[in-house]
Amino acid sequence: MLQTDKKWMIASQSPRRKEIFGMLELPFEIVVSNMEEGGRQADESVENYVMRLAQGKAEAVAENHRDKVVIGADTIVSLQGKLLPKPKTKEEAAFYLRLLSGRTHDVMTGVAISYEGQTHRFYERTIVHFHALDEAMIRAYVETGDSLDKAGAYGIQTLGALCVAKIEGDYHNVVGLPLTRLVRELRALQLITIGDVHAYT
Ligand SMILES: Cc1cn([C@H]2C[C@H](O)[C@@H](COP(=O)(O)OP(=O)(O)OP(=O)(O)O)O2)c(=O)[nH]c1=O
């Protein structure tokens, strides 16, 4: 359905980003940047922070792949201004889930598209409402180990779905890549086009 004459590269180790971008059926390669993520600067907005991290990932890879369109992304969970990144331990995961329980938080994904020495960036926000979680639920979920590689300590696409009452915004943004916004941006940048439509009767 989508057409491109570009070569594509995803600067991410995340299997979810690979799967989501794969939905577009464009050929692409994965190259992981070894960029150290670093912390948020004083007074830096969450929006700018996720875009800056995404840009760092994309540009670190683009440096050696000037002929490719390189996409980097970073996802973070933000609760009333407090950032909940990937938990380092199961204890930290349980702590994050207790904070999120019964409350509403933001999932922000920053995306950077690097091509021909230029980087275009944007972010997308999805609002996620959590059920009140009891301690048994939190402990049982954390014990599955699913929390540890995910911002906010849950995966909406896995058993973490049981924590979620509803979302406002793009589901794929929570999983790590805001697909529909990405395609709109790529079309605006004229990096992809919608293919010719032939009769399908
Ligand atoms: C909230 C949430 C996050 N996540 C994931 C998306 C991201 O992969 C991860 C946040 O970590 P990121 O630092 O954004 O990404 P990553 O370390 O997995 O990959 P890379 O830096 O190489 O691009 O959390 C889910 O899979 N499901 C969810 O519901």
Image (cartoon, grey):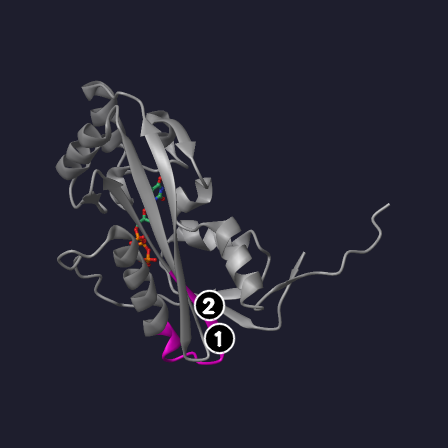
Answer with mark 1 or mark 2, whichever residue precedes in sequence: 2
Residue placed under numbered mark 2 in the picture: 9
Whole-angstrom CA distance, mark 1 to mark 2, is 7 Å
Instruction: Report x, y in % for residue 116.
Output: 46, 79
Total tally of numbered discs in the picture: 2
**Residue ID at (16%, 56%):** 43
- In this picture, which residue range is highlighted in magenta? 61-72
**Residue ID at (81%, 56%):** 198
Instruction: Report x, y in % for residue 110.
Output: 35, 55
Mark 1 falls on what kind of element?
Answer: strand
**Residue ID at (46%, 68%):** 9
Name the outermost residue toward the front: 43
Answer whether residue 90 is magenta in the image: no
Mark seen at residue 68 = 1
Instruction: Report x, y in % for residue 162.
Output: 36, 25
| Amino acid on which the number 1 mark rests in the picture | Lys
Answer whether residue 71 is magenta in the image: yes
Mark 2 falls on what kind of element?
Answer: strand
